[in-house]
Amino acid sequence: MAESLNSDVGLGEFTALPADVNNAAEGEAYSSATKSGNIFCKIEIAGNAVTASRTEGYEEWTSLNTMDVLDITRQTNPNPTQDKKASGRVIVKNTPLLIPHEKSSVDITQALLDGSDCTIYVTRLGHFKGEQRKPIEEYVFTNCEIQRVIDKGDMIMVVYRASKVTKTVNAYDIDGTGTGSSEFTYDIALNKAE
């Protein structure tokens, strides 16, 4: 029966892998594989981190399940021939964060209800030489107000408004040695770069 099925689907003679094949991931075989989420988020309310995880080095962070972190546009006068480019305004949209529904959801909802100031951190990690986690992109949103909280099963969506955003991009060589970084800070309230 198996021979008939194999020939019917074009496999010809199929043999199983030998039982002694080592299926363990060693060395560089899975250097880009991850054991946890690549993007983490930390929410501080009145200076206290309310998010948490079991990931070493990121105990005050939680996994972020959205890829959109920063949505920033520049809107100018609809007629660019009138040389009104200086009248343009940068708009940073209130990007929703989707995080696990944990005990922090009560603190986050309370911050919405009482208008507490928050600071939100987001980092995207890179993996070098297997397990070496290093931040590739880092975002800091300061003087935030939680605008909306939506329970979504085992996740919670948090929408916030920030007054200032800082983005840092870090560069590394293949071994994970830092080769430099670049950064910008934009004050949304004052509509200007720092």
Image (cartoon, helix red, strand yellow):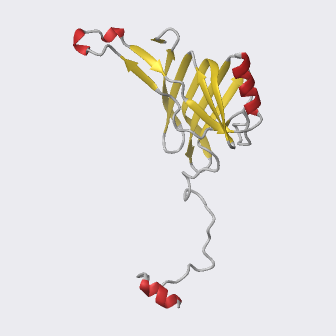
Residue 37, given in percent of the width and then of the height, sits at 62, 44
Identify whether 29 is placed above or below 164.
below
In the image shown, does 107 or 42 lie closer to the viewer? 107
Which of the 4 quarters of the picture holds residue 106?
A: top right
The answer to whether residue 12 of the structure is visible from this angle is no
Number of labelled discs?
0
Q: Residue at x 74, y 29 (%)?
A: 50
Q: Residue at x 59, y 41 (%)?
A: 65
- Outermost left residue: 81
Q: Residue at x 47, y 90 (%)?
A: 4
Residue 159, given in percent of the width and then of the height, sits at 60, 27
Residue 132, given in percent of the width and then of the height, sits at 61, 44
Horizontal side of 89 relative to 26 (left or right) equals left
Q: Residue at x 57, y 31 (%)?
A: 96
In the image shown, does 120 or 169 lie closer to the viewer? 120
The answer to whether residue 181 of the structure is visible from this angle is yes
Residue 192, given in percent of the width and then of the height, sits at 46, 11
Which of the 4 quarters of the picture holds residue 86?
A: top left
Which of the 4 quarters of the picture holds residue 74?
A: top left
